């Protein structure tokens, strides 16, 4: 009787382990596409076209950001209702940048004075064809079931996924990039 009970318990444990392992494997396979759409901050920079500054703009505090981008046209303090906090808004010709507690919170490029530059020297700027994004990031491009004029890439740093994403907004008809942004 005891042997039968022990064998039943072992069988139950074995079946449970196999079931759990199989479900985790399926979850990994299902998430593989989103993992492939993950872009490491170490692979790119958002910067003025002429900048040779090596550290990624996303990692800069306000002072270092201004050193890299130059003096803004204006600096304003803005209250964000959702965050219930003040943001510092730096306005440039073709770029808007917000800092929260001296860390970059959001950046938007709206003209070709600025670019998204990959570490392999590929550069994308406002006015370019969205086909460049599709070529560089085919998985993210393919993930668009109903193109709404935006391609999103999740960001990571030091192998940790961030709550930030890179967004290329484009005109669906002309396939021209209208803005490049990073935000939470």
Image: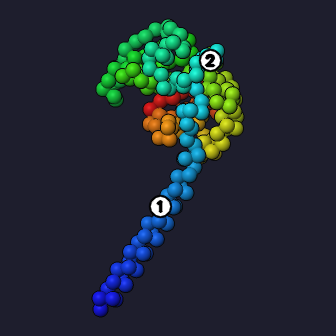
Q: Is residue 150 visible?
A: no
Residue drawn at point x = 34 percent, y = 20 percent: 86
Label 2 packing within 10 angstroms: few (<14), some (14-19), many (20+): few
Say which mark, if any, is on residue 47: none
Using residue 162 as the reference point, say whether residue 50 is left or right of it: right
Q: Residue at x 60, y 33 (%)?
A: 43
Observer able to see residue 58: yes
Question: What residue does disc 2 label?
Answer: 52
Secondary element type, mark 1: helix
Residue 168 occupies quadrant: top right
Residue 164 position, x and y percent, is 47, 34
Q: Which residue is mark 1?
A: 24
Residue 25 falls left or right of residue 82: right
97 over 7 or under it: above or below: above
Residue 49, position in %: x, y?
Answer: 64, 17
> In the rendered image of this protein, does residue 168 appear above or below residue 146?
above
Q: Is residue 107 left or right of residue 102?
A: right
Query: How many tags in the picture?
Result: 2
């Amino acid at each position: 009787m005891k042997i039968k009970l022990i064998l039943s318990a072992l069988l139950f444990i074995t079946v449970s382990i196999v079931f759990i392992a199989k479900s985790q494997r399926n979850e990994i396979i299902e998430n593989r596409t989103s993992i492939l759409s993950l872009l490491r901050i170490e692979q790119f920079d958002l910067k003025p076209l002429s900048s040779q500054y090596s550290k990624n703009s996303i990692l800069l505090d306000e002072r270092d950001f201004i050193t890299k981008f130059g003096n803004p046209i204006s600096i304003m303090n803005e209250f964000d209702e959702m965050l219930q906090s003040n943001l510092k808004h730096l306005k440039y010709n073709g770029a808007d940048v917000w800092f929260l507690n001296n860390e970059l919170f959001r950046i938007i490029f709206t003209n070709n004075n600025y670019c998204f530059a990959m570490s392999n020297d590929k550069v994308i700027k406002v006015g370019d064809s969205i086909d460049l994004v599709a070529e560089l990031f085919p998985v993210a491009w393919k993930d668009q079931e109903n193109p709404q004029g935006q391609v999103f890439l999740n960001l990571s740093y030091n192998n940790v996924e961030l709550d930030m994403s890179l967004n290329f907004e484009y005109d669906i008809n002309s396939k021209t990039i209208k803005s490049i942004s990073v935000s939470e």
